[in-house]
Every structure is written in C-alpha cells, then in structure tokens.
Image: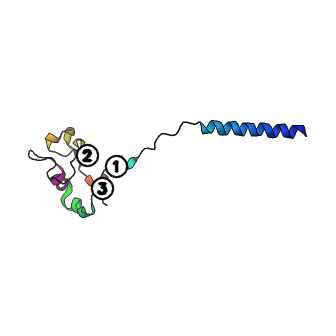
Amino acid sequence: MRRPVMIALCAGFVLALGAGVAGCAVPAEKAYDASAHAPALMPASHNGRFAELGAQGCYGCHGSSDQADPLLASAPKMPADHYSNSEPASREIDPVRMQCNTCHGQE
C-alpha cells in the first residue's frame, strides 16, 4: 500500500516541476509580419491599366523626372531598387522589375 502512494507522490512532484519550468519559459519572439513587407496592391481603379499600358504606364505616375518624384504627387514613389542599378537618376526601370503586376496584384 505504501508503494502506490510513493509513486503517486513522485508523479505529482514531476508534474508540478514540469509546470513550473514551463511557466518560466522565455516568451516567443513576435512572429514575422510578412504583410508589412509585402508589395502594395494596385487599387481597384487601376484594373486593366498594366495590361493596357505596361510598366511605362506605371512609371508615368510612380516614376521620377527632373521636375518631380513621383511624377504624380498623389502616387506612391517608386523605390530606388526598382530603377536600373538602383539609381533613380537613371530614369529607367530595372529590367527585372518590368512586370509590375508580378508582385503588385490587383485589389
């Protein structure tokens, strides 16, 4: 009779110790928020624009010139890494970025 009591006490001690250790665990790091780093979506009002105008149509508002950057004041500015050699002064879209709709989906 004494043996089952000892086993139960030992099991209870092990469970209590495990719960105590688990309660002292370091909190997990904040999960990576991919949406904060995702390319912006094209607004619904832009439906069909890329198919009709291509990357130069996007550049017409979001690109830069000697007078303005971006060309359309209310348009988000095109990031430097979207230009040839990551240089906005080149005024040329990097060839690997010419398919804007590959990353920038439609709302």
Q: What residue sits right under mark 2 in the picture?
A: 96
Residue that appears at 22% across and 41% down = 80
For label 1, count other residues whose C-alpha is less than 10 Å away and answer few (under 14), some (14-19) or many (20+). Answer: few
Judged from the image, the secondary structure of the residue bearing numbered disc 3 is: loop
Q: Nearer the viewer, residue 96 or 23?
A: 23
Figure label count: 3
Q: What residue sits right under mark 3 in the picture?
A: 41
Q: CA distance from mark 2 to mark 1?
A: 17 Å
- Is residue 23 covered in magenta? no
Placement of 4 over or under 107, stated as above or below: above
Q: What residue sits right under mark 1 in the picture?
A: 38
Q: x, y (%) of residue 57?
A: 17, 56
For label 3, count other residues whose C-alpha is less than 10 Å away and answer few (under 14), some (14-19) or many (20+). Answer: few
Q: x, y (%) of residue 54?
A: 20, 56
First in sequence: mark 2 vs mark 1? 1
For label 2, count other residues whose C-alpha is less than 10 Å away and answer few (under 14), some (14-19) or many (20+). Answer: few
* Residue projecting furthest to the right: 1
Disc 2 or disc 1, which is closer to the eye? 1
Of the residues shown, which amino acid type is indicated by label 3? Leu
Which stretch did the figure color magenta?
Answer: 55-63
Placement of 19 over or under 102, stated as above or below: above
